[in-house]
Image (cartoon, coloured by chain):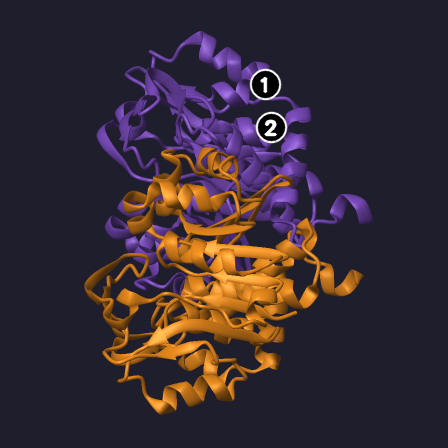
Chain colours: A orange, B purple
Amino acid sequence: MSIVVVGSVAYDDVETTRGNVTDALGGSASFFAVAARFFTPVSVVAVVGSDFKAEDRQRLVDRGIDLRALEQREGKTFHWHGRYHEDMNVRDTISLELNVFEGFAPNLLPDQRRCDYLFLANIAPELQERVLSQVSTPKLVAGDTMNHWITETHDELVKLLSRIDILTLNDEEARLLSGEHNLVKAGRAILAMGPRVLLVKRGEYGVLQFSKEGMFAVPAYPLEEVVDPTGAGDTFAGGMMGFLARHGRVTESSLRTAVVYGSVMASFVVERFSLDRLFELTWEEIDNRYRAFIDLIDSHHSRWITQ
Amino acid sequence: MSIVVVGSVAYDDVETTRGNVTDALGGSASFFAVAARFFTPVSVVAVVGSDFKAEDRQRLVDRGIDLRALEQREGKTFHWHGRYHEDMNVRDTISLELNVFEGFAPNLLPDQRRCDYLFLANIAPELQERVLSQVSTPKLVAGDTMNHWITETHDELVKLLSRIDILTLNDEEARLLSGEHNLVKAGRAILAMGPRVLLVKRGEYGVLQFSKEGMFAVPAYPLEEVVDPTGAGDTFAGGMMGFLARHGRVTESSLRTAVVYGSVMASFVVERFSLDRLFELTWEEIDNRYRAFIDLIDSHHSRWITQ
């Protein structure tokens, strides 16, 4: 089943210890969509400026992503400039220009309003709410947010949480939203706010999943070289939700597999700048790393023999 | 089969955000021994001062730990004073007094020299070497070390590494020893120095295991409250090696199970100060948390149904 994602399509300037890129294709919806498209059809609801390059549009279309609801407006595309520390878990935002994103009022196409799977990427809760209200009977709604919305639009966000099935946050955001430093307490407090599932993204330390069934913890796939962590969280969400939409059933078991696939996709995107690695990725590579990932976390080390 | 451990038996002053203790029983050999004793017989080679309390000796003896080679000397017992930050992965050493440990020259008893399993806790590589030379044909030698020995006695340490089967380090130590910031590269570099297995302890983020078979990653068991992380690494080593000695065979599969048991034991010790939690721990609790731990990391979420 297909997924609708609403979020940003952006140009990023990124500096890491491995190099720099300027005006590289980015944005939460781009990373999510390209990752999810390996599993299932995806359509993007977003806005870009008149500077948005035809070749970037084409790269997304070539991956089979539905861009009918990618609005193009007079003005500049959303632009982010970030710099990562040697410890790539830490980054500074040098500048952030909303540009055409400022007046963004997402409107879904008639067929998008009937979608089963909806991902509300990190945008204002007000806009997330606007999109959610346009979808008639979604089967699964997942959403992401960030520090800024947690502090500045706390009430709108909390109101929205009761309508979200799967919430993704990083550990710092989970602490901020819950007011609890301890992640187990934070997880429990956030589940009490409404989401059925909370996925806490911990960068190189992996993901911690909270649900009524308990906790599930996966490490990140250990890589020899991380070039650019930008988009890892959205790529994770894309792989996770892509798998769920393809699988068609959300159970504790399929959710755990989805978290592994999300982690696998995230492990690729950080290997190169921007979406470069995802654009050249093959299913064979995903398959191989999925197996390597299962071997990495299998405490019995016998899965491929016993099955 | 029984284990011989050489290391420190100490008194600790510990300050954490959850409280303080003074002159609490500690030391690498104490934590290791009490944890390992749940699995197999353990004898301790260490030295204490004339201030060592009879009741502390009794507590260890009551747990069934062999203290025939715990030397008592005129002077004060090794004393450590540490303070943990709000982020308990970070701690400052306020003071460290070697005291009677300064002239420590470990001598194994005849039966200890024939031991199969030997753990060289974090002491000078020179002393680790001295002990190792006294053991005739060990089946498995594991060892730990720290920043101080890596920088100050680098050559002695590296020489020893070729005779150690399982090396445990924290991530900072692995980076320092290998000169590689990236843990995958660090792991590979350290394996090339001799150990068959490297276990990188990452505190609340769990353990990363490197061996010729590849990598195995386990998270730490997420706890609602951590009272005192002191001794977690040695407790981990005790559970890990205790399981291996009891199991009797070291394979990739038994090693992974051992790492899980080590993680389980470590998850208990941090729940209270000093060795308090380990002293009151039961097998039933270990069993229950082992199952909870497997459930935490099982990507298929079906183990207890399919087996």
Please tell me in which quadrant of the rendered image residue A98 appears: bottom left
Splitting the image into 4 quarters, where does residue B107 fall? top left
Mark found first going from the N terminus, 2 or 1: 2
x, y percent for residue A212: 62, 39
Q: Residue furthest top?
A: B54
Residue at image x 55%, y 33%?
Answer: B265
Q: Give the x, y percent position of residue B284.
A: 69, 25
- The residue drawn where x is 44% and y is 87% is A59
Q: The numbered mark 2 sits on a residue in which chain? A: B
Foreground of the two, B78 or B208: B208
Q: Hey, what amino acid is under mark 2?
A: Arg
On the picture, is A50 further left or further right than B56? Answer: left
Can you tell which mark lies on residue B37?
Answer: 2
- Residue A74 falls in image quadrant: bottom left
Extreme left residue here? A94
Q: Percent x, y for residue A155?
A: 36, 40
Query: Mark 2 falls on what kind of element?
Result: loop
Q: Chain of mark 1?
A: B
Q: Is residue A118 left or right of residue A16?
A: right
Q: Residue at x 26, y 85 (%)?
A: A51
Quarter the N terminus of chain B occupies: top right
Return the residue nearer the eye: A116 or A280. Answer: A116
Residue A237: x and y in percent read 50, 62
Compared with residue B294, is residue A260 higher up or lower down, i.e. above or below?
A: below
Question: What is the C-alpha distance between the residues marked 2 and 1?
Answer: 7 Å
- Give the residue pinned by disc 1: B63
Q: Nearer the viewer, residue B110 or A298?
A: A298
Three-letter code for the amino acid on which mark 1 is drawn:
Arg
